[in-house]
Image (spheres, helix red, strand yellow):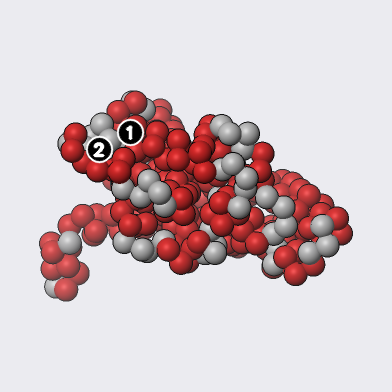
Amino acid sequence: MAEPAKARRWPVLSAACQRIVAWWKSPQRRQRNATGTMMDRVYLLLLSSLMLPSVLLRIWLVEDHLGVAMRGVPYLFFILLLPHVVIKYHSSFYMAHREVITTLTLLLGMFTLRDIAANGPGNLFISHGGSMARLAMLLMMTGHAVWCFIHSLYHRWSPNWSRLALPLTALLPLLVGESVCHKLLAAPGILQPLEQLHTAMVVAHGLMLPPGALLVGLETEQDNSLQQCLALDGYLLVFFGILLPSFLLGCWERREWQALAGEERAGQQLTERELSAHWMPERAAGATFWELYAYSCFAWHSMHGLQLLGWMGGTAG
């Protein structure tokens, strides 16, 4: 009697758990993981071959910072171990736990690469050129929002999994890891494009607020460059690393499932269990501007609020 009582008390959570369990056991998941395993091996081999010479060896041999280069060794060992040992000799284990392993790969990579970007030699932000657009691109690269976006789309995580994995892999390094903001603020001539970018974001995301709130937002922290940087770094990582890929994965999953649901499998209709494993809200299929704008506003105001509360203050490095 305990389980039905819990289901009645938490209907949304219970339904979500049932969908995740049904998806985890579904044949579609096993088929997708079997197809994606060899693609993952190519991806990991390419990633390790790029990271070793372009990041670690350059930092150690060219820029003479062995301590910083050693911070990337555990991650490099991990992404070398997966294709050469785990996938090669234990492919069935990898297929059965592919989502967990790829999530751990992304999480470890986010911590490692953000740490190297924050503490490594050199400063990419000196190439901002006074442009707020270029500054935004540099923030996305050094904060690794772009890599989080590419990683999740490449592995084609199910929306059921991406709703759990993407917030973990993006928010955990953001809240407890290193920030690149001290590197950004050390770049000459950075304050003007930083303020311009922050002001543009406040105005762009203030359309859903009362007029008075927009004026307050423009006046708040206009002289605090560190807070501006933290808010921008958090927004770019949350929107491009969590919300946008989750939205796109949901649209793709819905489109594939609609095509599959219209067919008969071995002369029989899809079972209730198979349908529940790929449940998606109907409106997830429509990629509209206002939906994305609402997600963007949510990311901006959430990160701005966390930064104001001081929850991101420890990430400044």
Number of marks present in the image shown = 2
Compute the Cα span from label 2 to label 1. Answer: 7 Å
**Viewer-side residue, 32 vs 106:** 106
Amino acid under disc 2? Leu
CB atoms of marks 2 and 1 within 8 Å: yes
Q: Is residue 296 left or right of residue 155?
A: left
**x 37%, y 57%: residue:** 307
* Residue pictured at 53% horizontal, 54% vertical: 181
Task: Classify mark 1: helix, strand or loop.
Answer: helix
* Location of mark 1 (residue): 203
Q: Is residue 81 visible?
A: no
The residue at 16%/73% (across/down) is 2
Judge left or right: residue 31 versus residue 305.
Answer: right
Q: Which residue is mark 2?
A: 214
Q: Position of residue 140 (x, y in %)?
A: 55, 43
Report the residue that reaches farthest toward the right: 61
